[in-house]
Image: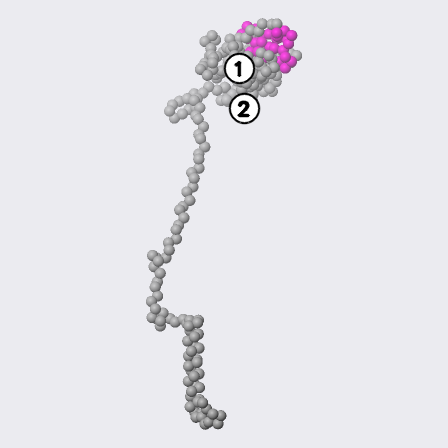
Amino acid sequence: MLGLYDSVDLGTSIDSLRSWRICLTTVIVLLAVGRFGIWVWPEQANVAVSTPTPESVPAVKEKPPKQETPKQQPPKAPQEKNEISSSGLGFKEVSPEQLGILVPDIFVVRFATNTATVFRKVLKKQVPFEQILGMKFPGSMPLKIYFNQHGQMKVDATIFEADGVTKAAVIKHSDFVVIAKAKGWDRNWDATGFEIVDAEKHPFFQIERLGENVIKLGGLFRMTDGSLIVINDREFAFLGKDRIATTPITTGNPLFAYPSKDNLHVRSAKRS
């Protein structure tokens, strides 16, 4: 230990301080390197740098292509029996108006043993049928025969059951529905005739086009006032409401064979 007054070599002390400062600086640097690290070039550090290969890179899975659901095609409409097909010739009988053939301006309407003449322009107006017959009744007849805008002959009619109240069938623009089908009523037709019969096969409505300008009508027609018109091959009769219950009603013979499901478009042997 140096005393307060001991002599000291000043040069030696300075060199010692310098050595200590260098050592202290080195320690600080080493501590900094250990704490924060340093960056060196790979060549300087003699470290092998590996280049990533395709095998070392994880493969990215591709999503499978989306499969589109094929669009469903609408079902084809069945080919009508009377259309021309590739397998042969087919023929369909139509009215003269559908082929643009002008029929005579005067039509003859046959009902029982009577005839009435009507002009074509009157049929275009869809007038009540009793006016076509040239007759007047207390009620109106639920029947119209007319030409539409395309020149085709059409029929509107309402057919009632025997009670005169319940609808048995309705015809509109020659389209029809038999409401009383569950009760045994039936219908049949071909290219020139149409008919509706009750369960006993009595014709309640008949219409035939016998020629280009000849129409024949038959059946039982209930008027709007409850009266009845009877048309068959032998008679034309008008029965008021008070006479219906006491007067025998005779209908004509059917035009077609029945049941229609077994005889569609087949004419009755009694009429041939």
- Give the x, y percent position of residue 267: 46, 12
Residue drawn at the location 63% of the way across and 15% of the way down: 224
Left or right, 55 with reference to 261: left
- Give the x, y percent position of residue 77: 45, 28
Circle 2 Cα neighbour tier, 10 Å, few/some/many (<14 / 14–19 / ≥20): few
Q: Which segment did they paint magenta?
A: 219-245
- Give the x, y percent position of residue 214: 53, 13
Whether residue 69 is situated above or below residue 263 in the rendered picture? below
Left or right, 245 with reference to 87: right
Q: Extreme right residue here?
A: 138
Question: What amino acid type should be assigned to the residue bearing mark 1?
Answer: Lys
Question: What amino acid type should be assigned to the residue bearing mark 2?
Answer: His
236 inside magenta stretch? yes
Q: Secondary structure at mark 2?
A: loop
- Protein image colouring: one colour
First in residue order: circle 2 vs circle 1? 2
Circle 1 Cα neighbour tier, 10 Å, few/some/many (<14 / 14–19 / ≥20): few
174 inside magenta stretch? no
Depth check, mark 2 against mark 1: the one in front is 1
Tag 1 residue = 183
Tag 2 residue = 150
Residue drawn at the location 42% of the way across and 72% of the way down: 34
Asked whether residue 94 appears in the rendered view, the answer is: yes
Asked whether residue 120 appears in the rendered view, the answer is: no
Whether residue 261 is situated above or below residue 20 in the rendered picture? above
Residue drawn at the location 60% of the way across and 13% of the way down: 164
